[in-house]
Each structure stands twice: as C-alpha cells, then as structure tokens.
Image (cartoon, helix red, strand yellow):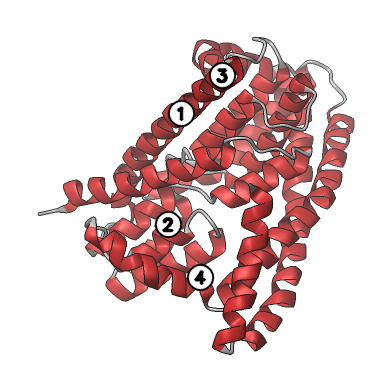
C-alpha cells in the first residue's frame, strides 16, 4: 500500500507538470526537498541521542517499570498481546506521556523504541496487532497543550491564544477514541478472514 | 497562559533532575548508560534518512507540480456540500500528508482570517488535534524495518477523518454565539 501511495504521488506530480508547464518547479523542489530531508534527519540525531540516552538511564533505574505498573490495567487492555512486564509497555507509556505534554521530539524516540520492542516480540517484518494499535493512537495525536498553535495565535495577537485548548482536547479525545475503535474493527475483521 | 508556559519550560529539566537523582541514588553508572543509549540514536537517525528522503521528495513533487492544489480544488466543492467550510478544506486534506505544509497553511489561515475568527479557531483546533499520519508511519515502520504495514494506514487515515469532523462540530458548538 505504501509503495503505491509513494509512487503515485511522484507519478501524478510529474505527469501533471508535463501538461501544466511546472516542470521547472518540480526540478527545483526535487533537490531542495532532498536537502531538507537530510537536514531533518541530521536534526533528529540530537533529539534521538539525548532522549534515548536519558531513557536508558531511566530504564536501568527502574523508572519505566514503575510507570508501567501505574497504568497497567489501562494499557494491558489496549495491548493484550504484549506480556505485562515487557519493556515495550514502558516505552509505549513514555511515548503517550510525552505526547500528552506536547513533547513531540521526545515522543518520537520513545515511540521508535516501543516499535523495536514490539518487533522483538513478533519476530516478523509484518506489522503486528499491537503496532497498528500503537500507531493509531499516535497518528490521532493525544496532545493536551498544543504549544505550537498557541505560539502562532500569540504572534497574530489573539485576544485569547489558549481558548482553543479545550476544543483541541475534546477533538483529540474523540479522534483517539475513534482510532482505537476503528483499529479494533479492523482487527476483528482480520481475525475473521484468517479463520475462514 | 503564563502557567502553561512555566509548566512546559520546567517539565524537561525537572524530568532530567528526577531521573538522574534516582539513578545516582541507586549507584548506577549514569554517564556510561546515557552514552550507551545515545549511541542507538545515531544509528537510528542514519537508518531513517532514506525513508524520510524518499517520502519528502515524493510529496514535494506532488506539491510543486501544482497537482496537489488541483486535487484540492477538485475535492473542495464536494466537501462544502457536507458543510465543511471551503477555506479549511486544503488544511484538512494536507494535514495527514505533510506536517510542514499543514503548519504553513494554519499560519496563513490565522493570519488572513484572524486568530479569533471561526476559521482561525477551527484551523487551530484541527492543527492541534491530529498528527501527520504519513510521517509517523514512515518514521516508526521505517526505523524498525517493517515492510507490511497491514491496516495501519487505513486506520490512521480514518482516525484523521474522525478528528477533522470532530474539530468542525466542536468548534461550531463551542464558539457559535
């Protein structure tokens, strides 16, 4: 699926440019965006090294285990195929917590670690059930305080920059809940398919 | 506002303090552990590069050619039929595909219509309440080498749609006076 989307975005763009005389723009964007991607990856190094380093200390100090214990009833229901004391749980929880507090750049390294742990559990290059659930929660974003948006609103002299916090929380809650429900529906559909 | 700003500036330093205090108390080799964990970060960033580059270039082709714009123009009237304000449609469509493009659009909408207008509030809520699905899938699956994504993309996109509809409904209810 991702192969088709990836290729068709590029194909559509190039074909469209052929007939609309925007080939020059495409050419320029091609190498500018490649540059941008490299800069983004290099920028990620600092964030990844810092957070993964700190998380290693936190993990060895037993802090992730405490976090997992606190939220066990909630997350073990969301991720029934991960063993209760598996380190994946700790990383999933740190990722969700980081997202909640709007620490987007801390959430990514922890999310990747969680994926790594889940891959160790499944031992395959197919997305496992818990991975899909985890990504569904992440794509629907569980931010409590949308700091970037508030900053933009302040810049354009909003009378109440934070008035959208409430609506954002409700919208985010509904979309996350929706994501979890949709994920479950797809899961049961898969189960039925394999049984047949 | 000042309370929220204070909390977010204190959060990370306090977290570092807490982790280091507990680890030192448990007599762990903190610095060595930090370096050990950090090494993984370098490898991760390098292995992510091709995934990010491929996806970003493909999106850039679609955007720069004008094809994305044309698609939005084509879909807009359809969505307007369902009561989606036409000004917000481009943002709603771009949000799951490109984070930087969406942020640019949100800024532009807030600038044009004012942060306290209906469109401004709606754009703010939409920007904050969903994430860039394509980016998240690329990074998370790319980093650990998952080739078959299963239903992840479908689930993510449906969740985005739910988020967009929820944003419109909630902003309409809360701010309609």
Q: CA distance from mark 1 to mark 2?
A: 25 Å
Q: CA distance from mark 3 to mark 4?
A: 37 Å
Do the residues indicated by labels 3 and 4 lie within the same chain of the protein?
A: no
A153 vs A33, left or right, is left
- The location of residue A89, given as percent across then percent down, is 64, 20
| Label 1: few (<14), some (14–19) or many (≥20) C-alpha neighbours in 10 Å | many
Q: For the residue labelled by badge 1, is the local secondary structure a helix, a strand or a loop?
A: helix
A15 vs A156, left or right, is right
Q: Chain of mark 2?
A: A
Q: CA distance from mark 2 to mark 4?
A: 24 Å
**Residue located beneath label 1 in the image:** A180
Above or below B13: residue B117: below
Q: Chain of mark 3?
A: A
Asked if the residue at tag 1 contacts the one at tag 3, i.e. Cβ–Cβ closer than 8 Å, the answer is no
Q: Nearer the viewer, mark 3 or mark 2?
A: 3
Q: Nearer the viewer, mark 3 or mark 1?
A: 3
**Residue located beneath label 4 in the image:** B68
Do the residues indicated by labels 3 and 1 lie within the same chain of the protein?
A: yes
């Amino acid at each position: 699926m991702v192969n088709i989307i990836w290729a068709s975005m590029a194909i559509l763009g190039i074909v469209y440019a052929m007939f609309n005389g925007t080939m020059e723009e495409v050419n320029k964007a091609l190498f500018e965006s490649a540059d941008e991607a490299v800069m983004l990856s290099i920028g990620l190094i600092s964030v990844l090294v810092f957070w993964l380093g700190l998380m290693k200390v936190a993990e060895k100090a037993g802090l992730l285990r405490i976090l997992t214990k606190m939220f066990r009833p909630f997350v073990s229901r969301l991720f029934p195929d991960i063993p209760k004391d598996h380190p994946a749980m700790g990383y999933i929880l740190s990722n969700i917590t980081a997202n909640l507090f709007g620490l987007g750049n801390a959430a990514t390294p922890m999310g990747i670690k969680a994926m790594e742990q889940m891959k160790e559990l499944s031992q395959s290059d197919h997305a496992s059930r818990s991975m899909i659930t985890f990504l569904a929660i992440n794509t629907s974003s569980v931010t409590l305080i949308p700091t970037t948006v508030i900053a933009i609103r302040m810049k354009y002299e909003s009378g109440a920059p934070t008035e959208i916090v409430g609506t954002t929380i409700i919208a985010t809650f509904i979309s996350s809940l929706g994501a979890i429900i949709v994920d479950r529906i797809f899961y049961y559909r898969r189960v039925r398919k394999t049984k047949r | 506002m000042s309370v929220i700003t204070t909390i977010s500036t204190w959060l990370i330093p306090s977290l570092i303090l807490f982790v280091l205090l507990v680890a030192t108390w448990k007599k762990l080799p903190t610095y060595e552990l930090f370096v050990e964990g950090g090494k993984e970060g370098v490898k991760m960033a390098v292995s992510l590069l091709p995934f990010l580059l491929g996806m970003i270039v493909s999106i850039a082709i679609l955007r720069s050619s004008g094809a994305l714009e044309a698609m939005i123009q084509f879909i807009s009237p359809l969505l307007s039929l369902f009561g989606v304000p036409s000004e917000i449609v481009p943002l709603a469509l771009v949000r799951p595909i490109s984070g930087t493009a969406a942020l640019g659009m949100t800024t532009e909408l807030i600038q044009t219509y004012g942060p306290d207008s209906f469109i401004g509030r709606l754009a703010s809520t939409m920007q904050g309440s969903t994430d860039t699905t394509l980016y998240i899938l690329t990074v998370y699956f790319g980093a650990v080498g998952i080739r078959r994504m299963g239903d992840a993309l479908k689930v993510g996109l449906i969740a985005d749609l739910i988020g967009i509809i929820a944003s419109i409904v909630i902003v309409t209810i809360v701010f309609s006076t």
